[in-house]
Image (spheres, rainbow, N blue to C red):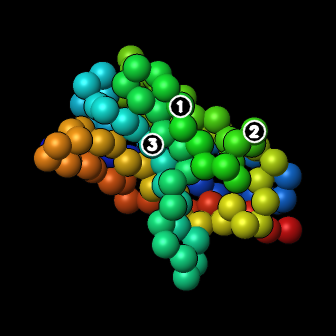
Amino acid sequence: QVELVESGGGLVQPGGSLRLSCAASRSILSFVYMGWYRQAPGKQRELVALVASGGGLTYADSMKGRFTISRDNAKNTVYLQMNNLKPEDTGVYYCNVKVRILPPLDYWGQGTQVTVSS
């Protein structure tokens, strides 16, 4: 079992920045991936960014150049730095860890709201 606690969401104006944090209840060293997904109102949950155990990074196209994912293994925490935020970035952001690929085993955080509005 892995518990994930997200923080850092809030209301920000277009062009602003936020940093989300996701703290895991145990060591993240063995996780295959850690990442962030988001769900906008009326839309399906979508990938934002992933960081692999080996350090490889994956970003959704619309986030490239604006968002940066990173991990701090000593703090069992993954971060998402979001810059130049746009109204279409509004949604609930969820932290995800993939503990195992086969059979699949994932855990999700409770989500943190990000609202980009003037």
Residue 45 appears anywhere in the view: yes
x, y percent for residue 114: 62, 61
x, y percent for residue 2: 22, 42
Q: CA distance from mark 2 to mark 3?
A: 17 Å
x, y percent for residue 14: 84, 59
Q: Earlier in the sequence, mark 3 or mark 1?
A: 3
Residue at 49% x, 72% y is 44
Residue at which label 3 appears? 35
Q: CA distance from mark 1 to mark 2?
A: 13 Å
Residue at which label 2 appears? 65
Query: Vertically, is 16 above or below 111?
Result: above
Q: Are marks 1 and 2 in contact (CB under 8 Å)?
A: no
Local SS, label 3: strand
Determine which quarter of the picture holds residue 34. Answer: top left
x, y percent for residue 29: 30, 22
Q: Amino acid at mark 3?
A: Gly
How busy is the neighbourhood of tag 1: few (under 14 within 10 Å), some, or many (20 plus)? some
Residue 6 appears anywhere in the view: no
Give the position of the C terminus as an image quadrant.
bottom right
Give the position of the N terminus as an image quadrant.
top left
* 33 sits to left or right of 31: right
Number of numbered labels in the structure image: 3
Q: Amino acid at mark 2?
A: Gly
How busy is the neighbourhood of tag 2: few (under 14 within 10 Å), some, or many (20 plus)? few
